[in-house]
Image (cartoon, grey):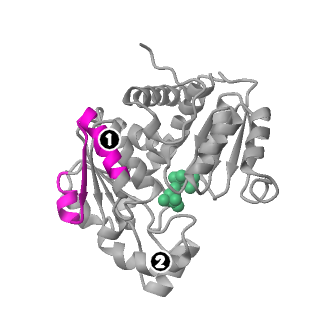
């Protein structure tokens, strides 16, 4: 039977079957090919979408905007300060109104329950552009990048170093379970994935042959890895006061040349971005002045090195988001 996700929301990959995820990945590769060849694909002409952001963004916002326009749609962007939602209008009322005006809604913000309620009340597909818990559109871009490098992802060993209980790490564990990969969360005990999510992923893994491993040792985790992945140590929405503790806990988990050397020689490095790998950002400079760190979760040498695929990964956000919108709205 063919896969059909028309009319569905995209809130967490836990809701999607391996076949549905693979279908979206195939479609993404096809959209990437069309874009490269300059083939027009305004398949959703006449439709309109709204992008609701309660946290800041570069990649996700721009990907939704470009993908929406390439598909021929009208796109409205609402920034963190300029909608009534939450302040003067309830989430439920906002969802009712946006559902009357738009064919689809992207939401980036805090609680996962907000994106779920938007889907419940709006009656149109809602796409999760990042919550505190999950970042599912990022996952399609990450897996597409891995496929471009290695082909089949089944059995590939992907290690996440650092804050392994954040939205990106949670989602990587879920997508790895769904697609039969070997996922390793490499972190100190305090930053390991929540037990209930790890248990859910292990249940999925029984069906797909995936392996879900938690390992505090960087050297053991990185050994024979195909993909090394990290993310910032303090995520959007977390308090600034947490930096000192996180630096203390996560400094040993920095991805640097030594860590890369434990992995397979053809291993690749991924990062969802943005990244603190130098002093060329306000936060990077503040951290340097306070804690003397030149780089945090990854070094310049790795992020700009020959094994890094971060910028292909960033481009793939657009192709994969296009596939999700097309598949759910067509
Ligand atoms: N990776 C990612 O979601 O980036 P933005 O925060 O820039 O959207
Ligand atoms: N974990 C990061 C991801 C940013 C794309 C954050 O939530 O800030």
The answer to whether residue 161 is above or below residue 172 is below
Kindly indicate whether the residue at mark 1 contacts the one at mark 2 (C-beta within 8 angstroms).
no
Comparing 34 with 3, the one in front is 3
Residues drawn in magenta = 197-224
Instruction: Name the magenta segment's main secondary structure.
Output: helix
- Residue 62 seen from this side: no
Q: Secondary structure at mark 1?
A: helix
Query: Residue placed farthest to the top in the image?
Result: 1
Comparing 158 with 173, the one in front is 173
Residue underneath mark 2 = 243
**Would you say 205 lies left or right of 116 here?**
left
**Would you say 131 lies left or right of 3 here?**
right
The answer to whether residue 109 is above or below residue 93 is below
The answer to whether residue 298 is above or below residue 92 is below
At x 54%, y 30%, the residue is 323
Number of other residues with Cα within 10 Å of mark 1, as a class: few under 14, some 14 to 19, many 20 or more? many
């Amino acid at each position: 039977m063919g896969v059909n996700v028309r009319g569905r929301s995209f809130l967490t990959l836990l809701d999607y079957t391996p076949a549905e995820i693979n279908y979206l990945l195939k479609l993404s590769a096809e959209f990437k090919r069309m874009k490269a060849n300059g083939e027009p694909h305004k398949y959703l002409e006449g439709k309109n979408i709204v992008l609701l952001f309660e946290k800041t963004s570069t990649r996700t916002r721009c990907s939704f905007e470009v993908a929406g326009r390439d598909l021929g749609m009208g796109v409205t962007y609402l920034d963190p300060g300029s909608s009534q939602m939450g302040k003067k209008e309830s989430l439920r009322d906002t969802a009712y109104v946006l559902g009357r005006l738009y064919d689809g809604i992207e939401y980036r913000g805090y609680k996962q329950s907000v994106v779920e309620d938007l889907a419940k009340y709006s009656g149109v597909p809602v796409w999760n552009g990042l919550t505190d818990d999950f970042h599912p559109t990022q996952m399609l871009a990450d897996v597409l990048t891995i496929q471009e490098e290695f082909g089949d992802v089944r059995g590939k060993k992907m290690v996440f170093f650092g804050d392994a209980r954040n939205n990106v790490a949670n989602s990587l564990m879920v997508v790895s379970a769904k697609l039969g990969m070997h996922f390793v969360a490499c972190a100190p005990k305090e930053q390991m994935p929540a037990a209930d999510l790890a248990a859910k992923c292990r249940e999925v893994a029984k069906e797909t042959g995936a392996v879900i491993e938690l390992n505090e040792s960087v050297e053991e985790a990185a050994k024979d890895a195909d993909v090394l992945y990290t993310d910032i140590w303090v995520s959007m929405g977390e308090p600034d006061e947490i930096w000192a503790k996180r630096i203390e806990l996560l400094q040993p988990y920095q991805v640097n040349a030594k860590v890369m050397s434990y992995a397979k020689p053809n291993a690749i490095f991924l990062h969802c971005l943005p990244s603190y790998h130098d002093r060329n950002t306000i936060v990077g400079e503040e951290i340097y002045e306070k804690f003397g760190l030149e780089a945090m979760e990854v070094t310049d040498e790795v992020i700009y090195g020959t094994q890094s695929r971060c910028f292909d990964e960033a481009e793939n956000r657009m192709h994969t988001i296009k596939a999700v919108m097309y598949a759910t709205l067509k």
